Image (cartoon, rainbow, N blue to C red):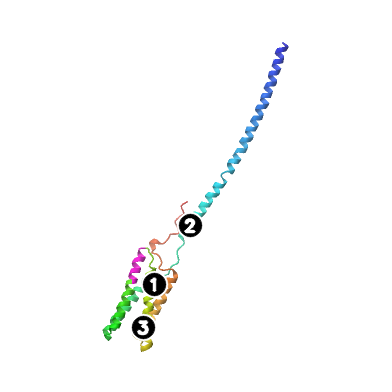
C-alpha cells in the first residue's frame, strides 16, 4: 500500500513538472509569435520607399513631357511666302518697265529662293519636323535683299522700288530673327502635348 501511494505521488509530481516545462515552452513560442509580426512589418519599409521614388520620378517625367516647348507665336511661312512673291513680282515689274536684266535676275533669284524655302518650311512643319534650316535660309536671303536695295537707295534716293524693298526686307529680317530666337515655329495642333492625360504608373 505504501508503495502504491509513493508511486502515485511521484507520478503527480512528474505531471506537475511536465506542465511547468510545457508552460515555459508555450510562453517562449508566444513571445516569438508576438515578436515576429513586428519584424515582418518593419521589413517592407524599404520596398515602400522604393515604390514612392519610382512613382515620384514617373510623375516628374510626365510633367516635363507635358510642358510646352518655347516657340514663336506665328510661323515663318505666313509672312515668308507673301514676301517671296513680292520680291519676285518686283523683279518682274522692274524688268517690264526698265528692261533691266539685273532687276529680273535679282527678283527671280531671291524671290524664287524665298518662295521655295517658305514652301518647304511649311511642308516640313506639317510633318512635325524641324524647319529651322529653312528659316535661317530665308533670313540670309532677306539680309542680302535688304543690303542690295539699301545700297541702291543710297545711290539713287528713290523710294520705289529700292526704298520700299529695303524697308520691307529689314522688317522681314527682324521677323526671321524673332522666330529663330523664339525657338522656331510652333508645333502643329495634332502634335501639341495634351496636359489632360493622366500619368501611367
Any magenta on residue 183?
no
Q: Which mark is residue 149?
A: 3
Q: Secondary structure at mark 3?
A: helix
Q: Quadrant of residue 158?
A: bottom left
Which of pointers 2 and 1 indicates the residue nearer the eye?
1
| Residue drawn at the location 70% of the way across and 21% of the way down | 13
**Which one is earlier in the sequence, the residue at label 2 or at label 1?**
2
Any magenta on residue 118?
yes
Name the residue beneath numbered marker 2. Answer: 61
| Residue drawn at the location 62% of the way across and 35% of the way down | 32
What separation in Å lies between label 1 and label 3 (alpha carbons)?
A: 20 Å
**Which one is earlier in the sequence, the residue at label 1 or at label 3?**
1
Residue 20, compared with residue 177, is above or below; it is above
How far from the left and from the top, in percent, is residue 140? 38, 75
Instruction: Locate residue 191 relative to residue 88 in the image: left or right.
Output: right
How far from the left and from the top, in percent, is residue 84? 33, 76
What separation in Å lies between label 2 and label 3 (alpha carbons)?
A: 51 Å
Q: Which mark is residue 136?
A: 1
| Residue drawn at the location 31% of the way across and 75% of the way down | 112
Dot 2 alpha-carbon crowd within 10 angstroms: few under 14, some 14 to 19, many 20 or more:
few
Q: Which residues are magenta?
A: 117-127
| Residue drawn at the location 33% of the way across and 69% of the way down | 120
Residue 21, compared with residue 161, is above or below; it is above
**Which one is earlier in the sequence, the residue at label 2 or at label 3?**
2
Q: Secondary structure at mark 1?
A: helix
**Residues marked 2 and 1 touching at CB (< 8 Å):** no
Q: Secondary structure at mark 2?
A: helix
Instruction: Locate residue 2 relative to residue 181 in the image: left or right.
Output: right
Amino acid at each position: 500500500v505504501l508503495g502504491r501511494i509513493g508511486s502515485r505521488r511521484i507520478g503527480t509530481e512528474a505531471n506537475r513538472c511536465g506542465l511547468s516545462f510545457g508552460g515555459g515552452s508555450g510562453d517562449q513560442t508566444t513571445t516569438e509569435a508576438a515578436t515576429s509580426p513586428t519584424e515582418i512589418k518593419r521589413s517592407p519599409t524599404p520596398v515602400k520607399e522604393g515604390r514612392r521614388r519610382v512613382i515620384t520620378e514617373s510623375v516628374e517625367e510626365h510633367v516635363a513631357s507635358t510642358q510646352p516647348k518655347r516657340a514663336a507665336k506665328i510661323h515663318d511661312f505666313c509672312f515668308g511666302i507673301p514676301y517671296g512673291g513680292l520680291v519676285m513680282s518686283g523683279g518682274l515689274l522692274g524688268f517690264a518697265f526698265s528692261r533691266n536684266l539685273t532687276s529680273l535676275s535679282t527678283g527671280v533669284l531671291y524671290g524664287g529662293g524665298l518662295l521655295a524655302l517658305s514652301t518647304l518650311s511649311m511642308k516640313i512643319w506639317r510633318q512635325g519636323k524641324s524647319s529651322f534650316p529653312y528659316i535661317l535660309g530665308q533670313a540670309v536671303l532677306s539680309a542680302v535683299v535688304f543690303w542690295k536695295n539699301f545700297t541702291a537707295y543710297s545711290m539713287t534716293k528713290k523710294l520705289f522700288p529700292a526704298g520700299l524693298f529695303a524697308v520691307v526686307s529689314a522688317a522681314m529680317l527682324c521677323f526671321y530673327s524673332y522666330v529663330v530666337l523664339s525657338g522656331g515655329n510652333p508645333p502643329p495642333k495634332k502634335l501639341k502635348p495634351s496636359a489632360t492625360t493622366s500619368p501611367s504608373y
